[in-house]
Amino acid sequence: MSLLVQLSDPHIDLGPADTGSAEALAATVRAVTALDPAPDAVLVSGDLTNAADARSYERVHELLAPLAMPVHVLAGNHDDRAGLRERFAGGAVEGSGGEPFRYAARCGAVRLVGCDTTVPGRPGGRLDGEALAWLETTLAAEPTTPTIVAMHHAPLLLGIGPMDAIGLPAADRAALKDVIGRFAGVRRIIAGHVHRASFGRLGACPVFTCPSTHLELRLDTGPEIDLEPAPPAFALHRLLASGEIVTLLQPVGAG
């Protein structure tokens, strides 16, 4: 049985307006280190920092250091690819500098494929032709291996207008659906960005978005995105003996 833990959107902020982002991530890391059995790997699915500066990335690195298992990260719309790569790029991460943050990594018996959906300088995401071609080639290398495709922007509408406006465009979601549908090994698409747990499907493939480790999206948000200090949580993606993947949600501070 393989286990991948997903954390998302810690938004570590070293400025005076911070409301406890570092303390929240530290509490989440403590909860993950207490898991028994320990996960095979941890994924942080984007927006590691708020300002994308070197000091913030150094602080995130310090906060994640107690995790003894491999830690994989993805760029979010608040991240800087080059800064993220400087502190977190492992052997599996492709490219250099400000190039897209992409990789395929083994997490126990699961293959994790990290796909960059960010557009530098913009809050919304994209999966253009080059990104989709990379994804198809990467999936084709192991078409039947149980696979989780991870990205920051979810290929899913929430029905919450201001958040849907900065998601993935409809054409990109449709193109991704076509690519994913050709590979039986893809068991789940996981994402962050929306600061709330949500579940849906892209074609036949289940889609999950992970809550933030700090601030969560209000359901009754108006024309602007509104975040609140609701209880944080993380996700556990478990590969069962049947070959299916089940996703569990664990609030931080709950037993």
Image (tube, rainbow, N blue to C red):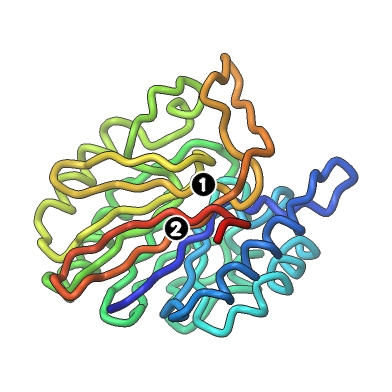
Percent x, y for residue 160? 45, 23
* 233 vs 184, nearest the viewer: 233
Q: CA distance from mark 1 to mark 2?
A: 8 Å
Label 2: how many residues lie within 10 Å, few (<14), some (14-19) or many (20+)?
Answer: many
Disc 1 element: loop
> In the image, is residue 222 above or below residue 16?
above
> In the image, is residue 137 above or below residue 165?
below
Q: Quadrant of the C terminus?
A: bottom right
Kindly identify the amino acid type of the residue bearing the numbered disc 2. Answer: Ala
Percent x, y for residue 239? 26, 70
State the residue position of label 1: 211
Kindly identify the amino acid type of the residue bearing the numbered disc 1. Answer: Pro
Q: Quadrant of residue 188?
A: bottom left
Percent x, y for residue 85? 58, 70
* 206 vs 100, nearest the viewer: 206
| Cβ atoms at labels 1 and 2 below 8 Å apart | yes
> In the image, is residue 157 above or below residue 56?
above
> Is 13 placed left or right of 174 in the picture?
right
Looking at the rendered structure, the number of numbered marks drawn on it comes to: 2
> Is 114 placed left or right of 30 in the picture?
left
Q: Residue at x 44, y 58 (%)?
A: 235
Disc 2 element: strand
Q: Residue at x 59, y 38 (%)?
A: 216
> Reading the chain from its start, which is encountered first: label 1 or label 2?
1
Q: Residue at x 33, y 70 (%)?
A: 112
* 1 vs 92, nearest the viewer: 1
Label 1: how many residues lie within 10 Å, few (<14), some (14-19) or many (20+)?
Answer: many
- The outermost residue toward the right is 16
Percent x, y for residue 96? 52, 71
Q: Determine which of the numbered discs, if any, sits on residue 235 in the image.
A: 2
Q: Residue at x 31, y 60 (%)?
A: 149
